[in-house]
C-alpha cells in the first residue's frame, strides 16, 4: 500500500456541528497496482480504479432506469435525483454526461430540466478533487469538459446548500454540505404553505430517484440510519426508485420499513448482487402516478412588477425555466435603488458556526457564480462585463467579525492577508492594515450591463407600466396599470393577464398589496467623480470597505444611459449615506460631504489626494427597503394562489436577489429550493413577527 498524498490542515479547535471538516484523502495502491483515492475518515475507496465509472453507470444510472425515464420527460418537466455522498462527483458526472447525450439526440428534452441534489459531510478539497478527477478526464475523455466545468464552479467548503447551475445543459447541482440526515431534513416540501384551501397547496417537490452511495454500512452507519430512511420516505412518492450496491440487512430492512419494495439484482462485474427499490403506494404523496408529469399545470406566464435587481433576477430565473415573463416598471429598468453606477458584491459575514442558516454567505457565493456565467455571455455578445472580480478589502472598521473568526473560513472565500500584501493591493501606505478581511471573489457589479444581458432573454418582455391594481381569480391574475404613450404625459390603461404575479416593487410593494408589510425606507446617496491622473495614483486600487465603501472603476458603454459617466473614463465612487425614514431621492450636497468625510475619517492619508470641495461630484440617491428583522420577503402572500413577492433586499440586493429568486422560482414551480425550510420560513412574507410588529404600530 503506497500513500502518495495526505491532506490537510488539522482543525485548531473542536468543530461546531455545522462547521465542515474537509475529507482527508489517502492514496493507496489497489490489487492491480493502481493508485486509488481512499477516504481518510472511513478507510474505504471512493471508486474502483479499474471500472469505477462503469460501476457507477451500472448501479445508479441503469438501475434507476435513468436513460428511459429521462428520455420520456415531457416538455418543461423536471426530474430530481438525490444522492447520499457526493464524494468525487463521479456519479454526478456520469449522470450529467448521459443527460447531455440524451438532450443532443432528443429535441423533446430542450426545455426539460435535471435537478441533482447531493449531500456530503466531508467534502474533498479542490486540490485533491482536481487530482482525482484528472484521472477520469484522462481515462474517460467524454467527461473531460464536464470535469472542468465542475471544478471551475466547485464551492468553498462551508456548510449549507451550494447551487451550481450548468445553465446551457439545464442541469442544477445542489451540493448540501453537512450531515446528510440534516441536509435531507432541510429540504422544504412547502407543505406548510397551504393557502385558501388544500388544493392551493404549493406544488410539492419529490425525489424521483435515489443514489444510495454511502460507504459500506460496516464502515459508516450514518448514511444507513433510521433518520435517513425516514427522510427518504418523506421526500419520495409512489414510483420513486432507489439503487445501491449494498445488500446489507440494515439497508434492506431500512428501505422496506419506509415504504420501498426491494429487489436483489445482479451486481456489477464480479459482484454477485446489488439492491434496487421502488416506493410502493406512498400515502403521503399527492401524485399517484410517477408518469403524470409534474409539469402539468406549470405556470406559463408571469408578470414581474418592478425592474430593479430583485425583479430582473426573478424574471431571468423564471425565464430560464421556460416561463414567459412580462416585466414592467413604472419608470424604467434599474430606475430605483438598483441603478447605481456600480454595486459592491460583498456578504455580511457571520461566525462560521452560523453559516448554515446564513442567507448572506450562501447568497454571496451563488451570486458570484451566476455573475461569472453572465460574464461569459457578455464576452460572447461583446458587451461590458457584469462582475469585475477585483477582490475587495474590508478594513474591519464597522463589522461584527474579527480576524480570528475570519480564519475559520476557507481562504478562497474570506481571509486575512498580510499587511504588505494589503498595502500593495490597496495602494494605501500609512493605514494600519494588519486586521483585514480580504474577499478574493468580490468585486464591482455593473447594473446596467446586468440589466442589458437579462432583458435580452428570449422569454422576457419588458414594458413600461405603472401598476395600479392586481386582481386575482381562482386560476389567474390580472395586472392593470398606466402606460405612458407620449412625452406629453399621455397615458393609456393596460391590463395584462397571467398565471402569476411577483411584486418586486421594493418599498412601494405594500401599495400594490396590503398583505405585504410596509418596510423601513433608508435613503442612501452614492457619490462619484473623475479623478486626475495624479489622484488616480494616490487613490485606493481596489474596492475598500470601511464605515463606507469606495472603489475605482472605468466607465463602460451603456453607463451614460443611466448615470453621468463617460465610456472609457476613470471614475472613483464613494458610498453611501444612510438617512432613516426618508424615501426621497433628491441629490444633496451635504451627503456628498458625508461620504467624503467618512472616507477621510477612516483613511486620513487620503486627505493628500482629495480636496474637500465635492461640488463637482456626481451623485445618485436611492432607497434601501428593510424589514424590521432585516430578512428579505420571499414567497407567496397569505390567502393567495398567484401573488408572490420578492422584496426588502436592504443594503445587499446584488448579493441576495439571485439566490432568493432561485428559491422563489422553485416554490412557484414545485422544485426543491436551495434554501433550507427554516430559512424559507424566515423569509416568508407572512411571518407573524413582521405582521405583529406592524399591527402594534397602527
Ligand atoms: C446608495 C445605495 C448604495 C447601495 N450599494 C449597494 C451595493 O454596493 N451592493 C449591494 O448589493 N446593494 C447595494 N445597495 C442596495 C441595493 O441597491 C438594493 O438592495 C437593491 O437595489 C434593491 O433592489 P430592488 O429591485 O428590490 O429595488 P429597486 O431597485 O428600488 O426596484 C424597485 C422597482 O420597482 C418599481 N416600481 C415601484 N412601484 C411600481 C409600480 N406600481 N409599478 C411598476 N413598477 C414599480 C420602481 O420603479 C423600481 O424600479 C445600495 C443601495 C443604495 C440606496
Ligand atoms: C462512496 S463515497 C461516495 C462516492 C461518490 N458518490 C462519488 O461519485 O465519488 C461516500 C461518501 O459519503 C460521504 N459521507 C459519509 N457519511 C456521511 C454523512 N453522514 N453525511 C453526508 N455524507 C457522508 C463520505 O464522505 C463519502 O464522500
Image (tube, rainbow, N blue to C red):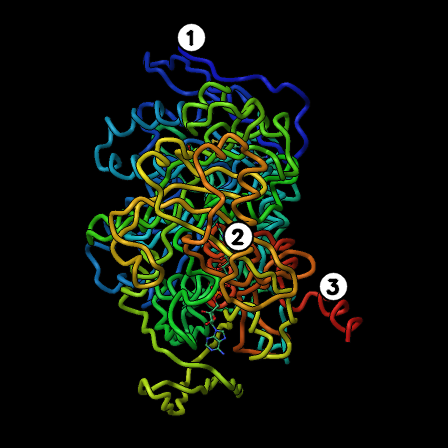
Q: Which residue is mark 3?
A: 689
Mark 2 vs mark 3: in front: 2
Q: Categorize mark 3 by other alpha carbons within 10 Å: few (<14), some (14-19), many (20+).
A: few
Q: CA distance from mark 2 to mark 3?
A: 22 Å
Relative to 183, residue 642 above or below:
below
Q: Categorize mark 1 by other alpha carbons within 10 Å: few (<14), some (14-19), many (20+).
A: few
Q: Depth check: 86 or 607 in front?
A: 607
Q: Which residue is mark 1?
A: 1
Q: Quadrant of residue 37?
A: top left
Q: Quadrant of residue 135?
A: top left
> Is the CB of mark 2 within 8 Å of ligand 1?
yes
Relative to 400, residue 445 above or below:
below
> Judging from the image, what secondary structure is the residue with disc 3 in?
helix
> Judging from the image, what secondary structure is the residue with disc 2 in?
loop
Q: Position of residue 215 (x, y in %)?
A: 52, 30
- Circle nearer the N terminus (2, 3): 2
Q: Are marks 3 and 1 in contact (CB under 8 Å)?
A: no
Q: Position of residue 481 (x, y in %)?
A: 44, 86
Q: Position of residue 230 (x, y in %)?
A: 64, 49
Q: Indicate left or right for 315 with 640 as reference.
A: left
- Circle nearer the N terminus (3, 1): 1
Q: Quadrant of the N terminus?
A: top left
Q: Quadrant of the C terminus?
A: bottom right
Amino acid at each position: 500500500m503506497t500513500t502518495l498524498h495526505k491532506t490537510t490542515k488539522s482543525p485548531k479547535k473542536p468543530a461546531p456541528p455545522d462547521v465542515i471538516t474537509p475529507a482527508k484523502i489517502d492514496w493507496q495502491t489497489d490489487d492491480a497496482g493502481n493508485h486509488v483515492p481512499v477516504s481518510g475518515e472511513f478507510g474505504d475507496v471512493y471508486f474502483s480504479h479499474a471500472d469505477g465509472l462503469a460501476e457507477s453507470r451500472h448501479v445508479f444510472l441503469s438501475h434507476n432506469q435513468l436513460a428511459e425515464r429521462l428520455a420520456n420527460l415531457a416538455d418543461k418537466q423536471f426530474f430530481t435525483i438525490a444522492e447520499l455522498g457526493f464524494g468525487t462527483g463521479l456519479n454526478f458526472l456520469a449522470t450529467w454526461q448521459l443527460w447531455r447525450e440524451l438532450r443532443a439526440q432528443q429535441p423533446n428534452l430542450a426545455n426539460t430540466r435535471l435537478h441533482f441534489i447531493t449531500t456530503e459531510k466531508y467534502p474533498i478539497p479542490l486540490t485533491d478533487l482536481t487530482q482525482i478527477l484528472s484521472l477520469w478526464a484522462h481515462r474517460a475523455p467524454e467527461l473531460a469538459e464536464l470535469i472542468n466545468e465542475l471544478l471551475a464552479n466547485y464551492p468553498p467548503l462551508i456548510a449549507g446548500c451550494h447551487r451550481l447551475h450548468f445553465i446551457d445543459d439545464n442541469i442544477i447541482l445542489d451540493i448540501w454540505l453537512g450531515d446528510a440526515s440534516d441536509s435531507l431534513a432541510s429540504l422544504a416540501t412547502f407543505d406548510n404553505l397551504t393557502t385558501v384551501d388544500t388544493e392551493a397547496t404549493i406544488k410539492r417537490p419529490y425525489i424521483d430517484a435515489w443514489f444510495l452511495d454511502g460507504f459500506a454500512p460496516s464502515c459508516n452507519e450514518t448514511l444507513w440510519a433510521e433518520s435517513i430512511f425516514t427522510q427518504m420516505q418523506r421526500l419520495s412518492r409512489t414510483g420513486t426508485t432507489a439503487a445501491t450496491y449494498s445488500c446489507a440487512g440494515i439497508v434492506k430492512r431500512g428501505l422496506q420499513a419506509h415504504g420501498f419494495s426491494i429487489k436483489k439484482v445482479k451486481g456489477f462485474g464480479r459482484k454477485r448482487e446489488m439492491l434496487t427499490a421502488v416506493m410502493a403506494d406512498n400515502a403521503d404523496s399527492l401524485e399517484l402516478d410517477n408518469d403524470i408529469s409534474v409539469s402539468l399545470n406549470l405556470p406559463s406566464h408571469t408578470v414581474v412588477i418592478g425592474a430593479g435587481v430583485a425583479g430582473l433576477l426573478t424574471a431571468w430565473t423564471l425565464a430560464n425555466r421556460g416561463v414567459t415573463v412580462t416585466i414592467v416598471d413604472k419608470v424604467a429598468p434599474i430606475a430605483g435603488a438598483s441603478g447605481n453606477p456600480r454595486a459592491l458584491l460583498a456578504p455580511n459575514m457571520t461566525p462560521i458556526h452560523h453559516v448554515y442558516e446564513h442567507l448572506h454567505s450562501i447568497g454571496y457565493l451563488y451570486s458570484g457564480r451566476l455573475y461569472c456565467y453572465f460574464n461569459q455571455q457578455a464576452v460572447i455578445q461583446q458587451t461590458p462585463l457584469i462582475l469585475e472580480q477585483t477582490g475587495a478589502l474590508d478594513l474591519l472598521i464597522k463589522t461584527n467579525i474579527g480576524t480570528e473568526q475570519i480564519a475559520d473560513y476557507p481562504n478562497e472565500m474570506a481571509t486575512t492577508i498580510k499587511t504588505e500584501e494589503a498595502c500593495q493591493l490597496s495602494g494605501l501606505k500609512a493605514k494600519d492594515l494588519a486586521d483585514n478581511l480580504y474577499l478574493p471573489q468580490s468585486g464591482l457589479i455593473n447594473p446596467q450591463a446586468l440589466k442589458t444581458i437579462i432583458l435580452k432573454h428570449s422569454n422576457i418582455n419588458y414594458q413600461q407600466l405603472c401598476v395600479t391594481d392586481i386582481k386575482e381569480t381562482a386560476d389567474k391574475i390580472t395586472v392593470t396599470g398606466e402606460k405612458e404613450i407620449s412625452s406629453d404625459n399621455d397615458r393609456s390603461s393596460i391590463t395584462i393577464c397571467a398565471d402569476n404575479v411577483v411584486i418586486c416593487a421594493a418599498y412601494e410593494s405594500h401599495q400594490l398589496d396590503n398583505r405585504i408589510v410596509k418596510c423601513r425606507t433608508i435613503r442612501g446617496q452614492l457619490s462619484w467623480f473623475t479623478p486626475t491622473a495624479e489622484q488616480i495614483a494616490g487613490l485606493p486600487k481596489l474596492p475598500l470597505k470601511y464605515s463606507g465603501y469606495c472603489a475605482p472603476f472605468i466607465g463602460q458603454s451603456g453607463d451614460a444611459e443611466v448615470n453621468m459617466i463617460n465610456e472609457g473614463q476613470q471614475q472613483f465612487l464613494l458610498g453611501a449615506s444612510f438617512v432613516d425614514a426618508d424615501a426621497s431621492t433628491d441629490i444633496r450636497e451635504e451627503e456628498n460631504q458625508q461620504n467624503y468625510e467618512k472616507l477621510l475619517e477612516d483613511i486620513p492619508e487620503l486627505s493628500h489626494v482629495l480636496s474637500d470641495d465635492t461640488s463637482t461630484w456626481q451623485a445618485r440617491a436611492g432607497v434601501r427597503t428593510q424589514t424590521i428583522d432585516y430578512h428579505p420577503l420571499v414567497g407567496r402572500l397569505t390567502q393567495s394562489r398567484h401573488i408572490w413577492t420578492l422584496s426588502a433586499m436592504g443594503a445587499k440586493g446584488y448579493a441576495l436577489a439571485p439566490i432568493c429568486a432561485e428559491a422563489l422560482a422553485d416554490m412557484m414551480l414545485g422544485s426543491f429550493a436551495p434554501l433550507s425550510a427554516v430559512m424559507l420560513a424566515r423569509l416568508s412574507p407572512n411571518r407573524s413577527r413582521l405582521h405583529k410588529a406592524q399591527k402594534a404600530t397602527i
